[in-house]
Amino acid sequence: MVEMDIETFKKLYPNLAREMEQQLMSVEIRGSRTNDEDYHPKLPDAVDYIRRCKSVNEAEEVIEYLERTKQISKEKACELREQLYSQGLESFGPHKEFGYYMKRYYKTEE
């Protein structure tokens, strides 16, 4: 990791510094995964299931099911509900269509 003061950075990378200051290429991040030690990219987790939902009611049913079957803890269910109702379904990320995992992780031989 290289550390430098802001003035040195501006001298070395004037265009990048200007873009960062003006936030020309900034992207809002509306969802994140933290403290998910059990997360495996090929195994869907609660957020992945929620991202397949088309409505808040569907997402609530998914959370209820995962909590009832002990796939997520009561605390995690509460966190997911709080995010769902305060920030909306879109806060979990873009909608995942049917067949997402087949297209993403399994190569079909042509």
Image (spheres, grey):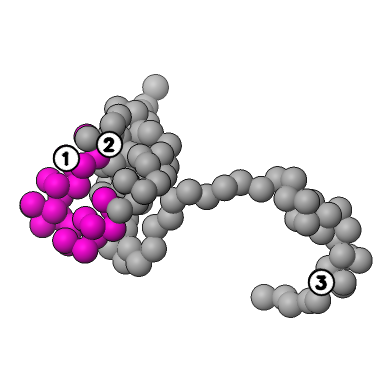
Residue 26: horizontal and vertical position, in percent?
Answer: 66, 48
On the rendered image, what quadrant is the N terminus found in? bottom right
Q: Are circles 3 and 1 on residues that touch, CB within 8 Å?
A: no
- Few, some or many residues within 10 Å of mark 1 (<14, 14–19, 20+): few
- Say above or below: 55 vs 29: above
Instruction: Please provide the residue range marked out in magenta.
Output: 58-81
Which residue is denoted by mark 2 in the rendering? 56
Q: Residue at the location (24% across, 39% down)?
A: 59
As helix, strand or loop, the secondary structure at mark 2 comes to helix
Labels 3 and 2: the sequence-earlier one:
3
Which residue is denoted by mark 3 in the rendering? 6
Labels 1 and 2: the sequence-earlier one:
2
Q: Is residue 90 left or right of residue 46?
A: right
Q: Residue at the location (26% across, 50% down)?
A: 81
- Say above or below: 79 vs 109: below
Q: Is residue 67 left or right of residue 101?
A: left
